[in-house]
Each structure stands twice: as structure tokens, then as C-alpha cells.
Amino acid sequence: MAKKNKKISLNTIAFNKKARHVYFIEQTLEAGLSLEGWEVKSLRDSKVQIKESYVILRSNEIFLYGAHISPLKSVSTHVNSDPIRTRKLLLNRLEINRIKEKINQKGATIVALKLYWIRGMVKLEIGLAKGKKSYDKRQDNKLRDWQRDKQRTLKQINYRL
């Protein structure tokens, strides 16, 4: 039987792998992004990284900080392209109020998880998260190693049969 790899779909632009290692993700939400034209063109070429980005709630609006969208070489010279500018996230008022309630808990934060296309629009998957302790990370690593060893052993047994 062929090995099934978990592939990132063709619609995914960027993925924050580190977030799931550092945080417990309790809930995920889909938010739209307010972008400029040159940013959309750069996203089509996947010239973005969201690993060091973070989300902040400020005056009943949610903003994405630290996401780096590199401008294309062919971008117009009259456009002032700031790769690390603050971008507004587009959410309903109800969703913002729910997020505000969750964030007021101790240790809770909002993390950018994935950037992707849906029907020609750029969406950002954000997660309501709590930080992991170092022993939680070690436990996750042990579990992942054990799962890998288990799969390897089962594969060897299946080949012998």
C-alpha cells in the first residue's frame, strides 16, 4: 500500500508550523485580510512568511502584526510598499466579542496559523491558544516519536507477511 503523505493543499499560501509546537490551540477561526494590490500579487507567488507574526485586539478591531509580505520586483515605483505593515483582519462583531472574552483569560493569546485562498480571497486561520510548558513540548515529542516507531514496526511486519 502506498504511503499517504500529508500535503499542504494547493490553496495554502503559508503555514505556521511552530505555532502548534509552542501553543495549545483551543479554537480556530477564519478571518479575511485587508490587503493592497501589490500584496495580493506577492501572495500569488507565495512571497510571505507568518512564522513571526502575531495578532492583537486593539479598540474592538483585530490586527495582524509582523507578517512579512515581500514585494515583487515588478511592483510600481509610485507605490510605497512596506513589507511588515499592520494588516486589519476582517471578522464579524460577534466573533470579535467572543475573541475578546477568551483573550481576557490568563495566558490566552491569538496566533496566526495558516494563510490560504478561498474563491479568490485570501483568508487567515487564527487560533485562540494557550502557551505550552517545556514538559508539555517534551511529552508531545515523545508521543510523536512513539507513533513514528509504531508505524515503522507495523510497516516491517506487513512486509514480512
Image (cartoon, helix red, strand yellow):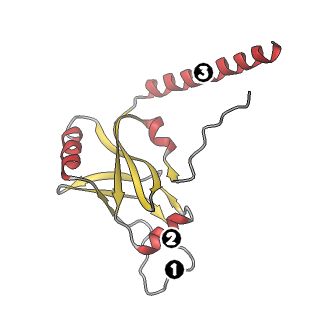
Residue 70 seen anywhere in this rendered image of the structure: no
Residue name at image x 60 percent, y 19 percent: 146
Q: Amino acid at mark 2?
A: Lys
Where residue 101 sits in the image (x, y, percent)? 18, 40
Q: Nearer the viewer, residue 156 or 141?
A: 156
Q: Earlier in the sequence, mark 2 or mark 1?
A: 2
For the view shown, which residue lies furthest in the right direction?
160
Camera-near label (2 vs 1) is 2
The 10 Å Cα crowd at callout 2, few under 14, some 14 to 19, many 20 or more, is some
Residue designated by label 1: 75
Question: Which residue is drawn at the image coordinates 54% and 21% (left, top)?
Answer: 143
18 left or right, relative to 30: right
* 95 or 81: nearer the viewer: 95
Amino acid type, label 1: Val
Mark 3 crowdedness (10 Å alpha carbons): few <14, some 14-19, many ≥20: few
- Residue that carries the numbered disc 3 in the rendered image: 147
What mark, if any, has residue 41 been given in the picture?
A: 2
Identify whether 16 is placed above or below 66. above
Find the residue positioned furthest to the bottom. 78
Gap in angstroms between the C-alphas marked 3 and 1? 47 Å
Residue under the image location 49 percent in, 84 percent down: 76
The secondary structure type at the circle numbered 2 is helix
